[in-house]
Structure formats: structure tokens, C-alpha cells
Image (cartoon, rainbow, N blue to C red):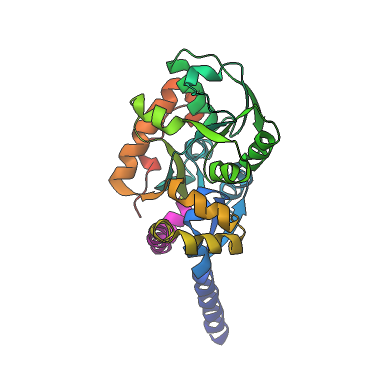
């Protein structure tokens, strides 16, 4: 009897310890991690930062992360490829994809044809958005050199005057700050909306389905803190920028410049569903593979 009681006590302690474990959260060095700066500073979760989504996708697929902030199309692909192991809980960034150039000549989407363009995000949102806009305008393709990370594309552009770059924030502001003569030539998010597709979604927060089921209160708390953190970052860029440098997200000066244009946001619930449903339908129409074969069904969307 005493052994049974002791075993029960040990089990309760182990369960309690497990429940007390912080959520494991993965984010990319860019607007997704920038929006979490206050949350990271305050603690309460275990954060993993990466320079490429390729580093986060296997971690959450294997259950080594509970939550991940991913490019919008990869969230849908991962949902399909894992049989529903992850679900969307919020939109965290709206599109700020821009083409940078080295001259003052006005550029239209058609002027990219044949030009040397450095970019990252092949088989992800940047490539799909660029390809669709070129198709819509009947424009020829640029000579794109795809890099594994946006930081590599930015560095290549700064070393190659006369080239173009397709970059999101904070890399746009970083380049404009460090490379005199570089300028913004095209805003792809604006062209995307003008084409009738609505806001250009770039980042989605997903949580593992088993975590949503077993730790729903923790996910609710995380989302509340995410919302508050992103609002705080937008409202206090100087303070948040200093944290970003301290946390290894981004140089403070570059972060301060990038925050206003980074599209850091928090959209959940029905508004998230409506926004993502329209976006995934547009992506599917141009390339079914971009969303894993078919747009996510209603089970993809979660409101803990």
C-alpha cells in the first residue's frame, strides 16, 4: 500500500513538472522573432531562433517544438504533410516584400525581365508571389539567384552594384542603412493587393495539434502574450530594438529602422480564417504544390 501511495506521489510530481514546462517556440530572425521581443525578454517560453524555415520545420514536425512561426505557405504544406499535426493559431506578419535597386530609374514589374536578382525563399512565399505577379503582368522572369537565407541575398546584393534584390523587412532597412545608393524600387505587397488578392500574408503561427489538445490554457496564454508583445514592439521601437540586439535577433540600429515597416501584427479567430482562406485560394490557383496540393480545410484553423 505504501509503495502504491509513493508511486502515485511520484507520478503526480512528474505530471506536475511536465505541465510546468515552458512552451518550446521557434521563430525566424526577422519580423516574426522581432514581434516576440518583449515576450522573449520577459521569459515564460523556451525560444529557438533560426535563419531559415528549413531549420524549424523538422523540429515542429518531430514534436521538438510546440509552436512555430513559419512562412504562410509552409504552414499549409506542413499541415498536409504531417496529416494535421499542426494547426494555425494566428497571423503574425503581413507582407513587406520589396525589390531593391541601385539606381533612380523607375521600375515596373516588367522591368525585372533578365535582370540579376538576389533572393531567398525559393519554394516559399517570395518565389510564389513574384512568379504570380510576373504572370499577371505578362512580364519576363529576372535572372534570379536564390540564396538559402535573406541575409545572404542582402549581402550578395550589397556586393554587386547594378543587381536587384527581393527582400522582406528587416533586411530592406538593413541594406538601405548600410549601402548608400540602394533604394526601394517595387513594393510587391502593394502590387499583390492591387491584383485583388487582399493583404499579402507572410507569417503564420502554428501549434502542434497534440499541444492544443493537452495544453490549451498554455496556448491561450502564449497567444495573449504574443498579441501584447507585438503591440508593444510596434509602439516602443527604440526600447524593443535594444532588446532585439541583446537577444541576438537583429542589430539595434537596423531594428529601429525596420520595425515601422515590418508588418508585425496579430490576427486570430474568424479574421485569421477569412484572411488565410482567401490567401491560400490564391496560392492554390497559381500552384497547388505551394499549399501542399489543396488549400487547408477548416480543421487547420484553431481558436484555443
Residue at 49% x, 69% y: name it.
42
Point out the image quarter for the C terminus.
Answer: bottom left
Residue at 43% x, 55% y: name it.
212
Answer whether residue 214 is magenta in the image: yes
Principal secondary structure, stretch drawn in magenta: helix
Q: Is residue 175 shown above or below 255?
A: above
Where's residue 158, x and y in %?
66, 37
Where's residue 190, x and y in %?
39, 31
Q: What residue span does the magenta drawing correspond to?
A: 209-228
The total number of labels drawn is 0
Q: Is residue 290 shown above or below 24?
A: above
Answer whether residue 51 is magenta in the image: no
Is residue 76 left or right of 195 when viewed as pictured?
right
Where's residue 225, x and y in %?
41, 62
Where's residue 62, x and y in %?
60, 49
Q: Quadrant of residue 192?
A: top left
Is residue 250 left or right of 155 when viewed as pictured?
left
Q: Nearer the viewer, residue 223 or 107?
A: 107
Q: Quadrant of residue 65?
A: bottom right
Residue with the most extreme bottom position = 2
Q: Is residue 100 shown above or below 36?
A: above
Residue at 56% x, 83% y: name it.
6
Q: Nearer the viewer, residue 232 or 158?
A: 158
Amino acid at each position: 500500500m505504501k509503495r502504491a501511495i509513493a508511486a502515485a506521489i511520484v507520478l503526480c510530481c512528474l505530471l506536475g513538472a511536465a505541465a510546468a514546462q515552458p512552451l518550446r517556440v521557434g521563430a525566424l530572425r526577422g519580423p516574426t522573432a522581432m514581434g516576440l521581443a518583449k515576450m522573449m525578454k520577459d521569459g515564460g517560453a523556451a525560444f529557438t531562433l533560426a535563419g531559415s524555415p528549413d531549420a524549424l520545420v523538422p523540429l515542429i514536425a518531430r514534436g521538438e517544438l510546440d509552436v512555430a512561426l513559419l512562412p504562410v505557405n509552409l504552414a499549409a504544406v506542413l499541415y498536409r504533410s504531417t496529416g494535421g499535426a499542426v494547426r494555425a493559431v494566428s497571423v503574425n506578419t503581413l507582407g513587406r516584400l520589396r525589390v531593391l535597386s541601385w539606381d533612380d530609374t523607375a521600375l515596373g514589374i516588367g522591368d525585372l525581365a533578365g535582370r540579376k536578382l538576389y533572393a531567398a525563399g525559393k519554394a516559399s512565399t517570395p518565389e510564389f508571389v513574384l512568379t504570380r505577379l510576373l504572370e499577371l503582368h505578362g512580364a519576363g522572369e529576372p535572372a534570379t539567384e536564390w540564396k538559402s537565407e535573406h541575409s545572404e541575398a542582402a549581402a550578395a546584393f550589397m556586393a554587386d552594384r547594378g543587381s536587384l534584390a527581393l527582400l522582406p523587412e528587416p533586411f530592406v532597412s538593413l541594406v538601405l542603412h548600410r549601402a548608400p545608393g540602394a533604394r526601394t524600387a517595387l513594393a510587391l505587397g502593394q502590387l499583390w493587393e492591387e491584383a485583388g488578392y487582399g493583404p499579402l500574408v507572410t507569417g503564420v503561427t502554428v501549434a502542434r495539434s497534440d499541444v492544443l489538445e493537452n495544453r490549451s490554457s498554455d496556448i491561450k496564454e502564449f497567444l495573449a502574450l504574443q498579441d501584447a508583445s507585438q503591440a508593444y514592439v510596434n509602439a516602443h521601437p527604440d526600447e524593443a530594438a535594444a532588446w532585439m540586439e541583446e537577444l541576438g535577433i537583429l542589430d539595434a540600429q537596423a531594428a529601429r529602422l525596420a520595425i515601422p515597416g515590418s508588418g508585425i501584427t496579430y490576427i486570430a479567430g474568424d479574421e485569421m480564417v477569412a484572411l488565410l482562406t482567401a490567401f491560400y485560394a490564391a496560392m492554390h490557383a497559381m500552384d497547388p504544390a505551394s499549399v501542399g496540393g489543396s488549400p487547408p480545410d477548416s480543421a487547420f484553423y484553431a481558436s484555443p
